[in-house]
Amino acid sequence: MGNIGIGFDIMGLAIEQPGDEVIARHSETPGVRISKITGAQGKLPLEAHLNTAGVAVQRLLEHLGEPDRGIELEIHKKMPVNSGLGSSAASAAAATLAASELLRTGLSKRDLLPFAWEGEKVASGGRQGDNIVPSLLGGLVLIRDNDTLDIHRLHVPKGVYVAVVHPQMEIGTREARALLSPTVPMDVHVRHNANLAAFVLGMFNGDIALVGRSLKDDVVEPQRARLIPGFYQVKEAALNMGALGCSISGSGPSVFALCANSLIAENAGAAMQRAFAQHHLDSRLYLSAVNQEGAVIC
């Protein structure tokens, strides 16, 4: 979940599902080659230099001084494309970790982050880390500075659960970003910063009520809400079921509800789906605790 509403481009959270799977193998053909992509309905390129997973592994090989080392990647997309759930970041993170394990580099996931980040740039067009950092490292993360990779894990109170509903539609990241105004009124800026600071404080102190009061995006959400049919009805449905807060995941169209426990998340998720159905949109519900591991070797 990129942004988490109030943390545009600087905050992200990893969930347990959905996720991508990447298999890395040695190859006699020099360089990185993508042999197969499943689950993407032909929407993603097989050319390594155009694919987030391929570019990430290319950058890793360059770092190792072996750009011509033969690596074959097989990508199984298990999460929807253009969903606001970090699909491109998931592939980049998985490929980087898989290739590193295959080559026995001994690099930690933190060491691998710059290469995965370079892969993610293929899709996002910039250095935003709110998707790639939690995808690889897990947890709730704050990116203070993208250029220096100044990133920090934030505490998450015990029991916090997430309901994410993905309506069956797509919103492109670049298109959604192009809609955003480059200016923010001063009163909105002050209110938004106060909410962001209070959200972080509430998380560290385990103050769930403060987290709920603070999860309000007055900057990006109002500009992107019109892209998602029935968004405000979906949000209201989640809040009526006791969710701490509800907003757009990444660029959308997925919508998340942060909840104090799994029961509230289940009820909020079902209510969100019913609200989308009223706007003739089928949807998929994902229920998850915060994924503290990120990418893993299976």
Image (cartoon, rainbow, N blue to C red):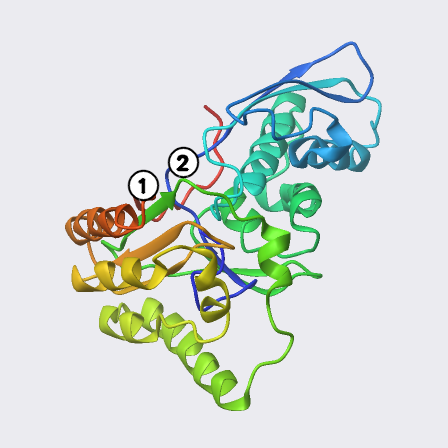
How many tags in the picture?
2
The answer to the question of whether label 2 and label 1 lie on touching residues, with beta carbons closer than 8 A, is yes
Q: Name the image quarter holding residue 180.
A: bottom right
Looking at this view, is 245 or 103 the one in front?
245
Q: Residue at x 27, y 45 (%)?
A: 277
Q: Name the image quarter holding residue 10.
A: bottom right
Query: What kind of element bears circle 1?
Result: strand
> Where is mark 2, residue-wise?
18
Relative image position of residue 224 (x, y in whole percent):
49, 63
> Where is mark 1, residue-wise?
286
Q: Which residue is drawn at 59% across and 46% down?
A: 110
**Label 2: how many residues lie within 10 Å, few (<14), some (14-19) or many (20+)?**
some
Does 16 sit above or below residue 84? above
Relative image position of residue 123 (x, y in whole percent):
66, 44
Looking at this view, is 21 or 175 the one in front?
175
**Alpha-carbon span between mark 2 and mark 1:** 7 Å
- Looking at this rendering, what residue extends furthest in the top direction? 28
Does 32 sit above or below residue 153? above
Task: Name the amino acid type tagged 2.
Answer: Pro
Relative image position of residue 269 (x, y in whole percent):
24, 48
- Looking at this rendering, what residue extends furthest in the bottom direction? 187
